[in-house]
Amino acid sequence: MIAIVDYGLGNLHSAAKAFERIGCDAMLTDDPAQIALADAVVLPGVGAYGDCYRGLAERGLVEPVREAAFSGKPFLGICVGFQLMFEGSEEGPFEGGLGIFKGWIRRFKPAPGSGLKVPHMGWNQVTAVQGVGCPLLPEGESPYFYFVHSYYADPAEPGVVLAECVYDKPFPAIIGRGNIFACQFHPEKSQGAGLALLKRFGERAGLRGSEVCAS
């Protein structure tokens, strides 16, 4: 069973529906005991960074989520869930984070005249970092995923960036260390490529799912 952390904000049901579509058992929960017992944990995120963190804190989920990440079981952060895994964000007024990865969340600042807008919204290509590789992506391919974000990760640890995307400059699209992964894009909104990524994640927890999407 995959536990999808429910902190009361955003359309968190879309992640559960995506896992259902690929045949992996998943449940939305704000129960620390269920999170601890799950085979894998997903921390989704929609909305403002500070609101999401406070949603976790008000439900007593900050430490249970951190413990799940460091437990050795597969763990996946999505979008704002990705950002919450760092030490803090420039998105005010709240600045703290879960501190699972060292580093900070920065706001995009495209150069004047670039024509690029904030937020970065829409489909963009994700490419594994050469020499590092990413187990959540098909080998040798650079799929397109759906992004909606105004902030990007600036990791302070070497080697945690598994895949990148380019907007005004390259930025981390997927990070990982051991059992812990996170993606800045929304796999649950990324059609076949997103379902394939979630299927690979589920397989790491021994949940093989269906053959809805090709791996």
Image (tube, rainbow, N blue to C red):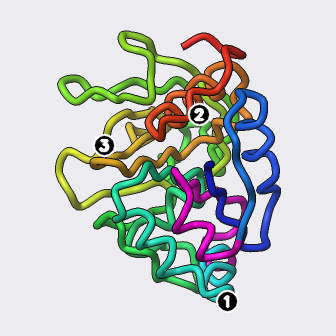
Q: Marks 3 and 1, how far apart in space? A: 31 Å
Identify the mark nearer the N-term, 3 or 1: 1
- Image position of 190 (left or right of 156): right
Q: Position of residue 105 (x, y in %)?
A: 44, 64
Q: From the viewer's perspective, is the residue at label 3 or at label 2 nearer?
A: 2
Give the numbered dot on residue 198.
2
Give the numbered dot on residue 42.
none
Mark 1: give few (<14), some (14-19) or many (20+) Cα within 10 Å.
few
Quadrant assignment for the C terminus:
top right
Q: Which residue is mark 1?
A: 58
Q: Marks 3 and 1: CB-CB under 8 Å? A: no
Mark 2: give few (<14), some (14-19) or many (20+) Cα within 10 Å.
many
- Image position of 151 (left or right of 123): left
Q: Position of residue 176 (x, y in %)?
A: 34, 46
Q: Residue at x 56, y 34 (%)?
A: 207
Q: Marks 3 and 2: CB-CB under 8 Å? A: no
- The amino acid sitting under disc 2 is Leu
Q: Marks 3 and 2, how far apart in space? A: 18 Å
* Residue 123, image quadrant: top right
Secondary structure type for disc 2: helix
- The amino acid sitting under disc 3 is Val
Q: Position of residue 101 (x, y in %)?
A: 32, 63
Q: Residue at x 51, y 54 (%)?
A: 108
Q: Position of residue 177 (x, y in %)?
A: 28, 49
Q: Which residue is mark 3?
A: 161
Secondary structure type for disc 1: helix
Q: Which residues are magenta?
A: 30-51
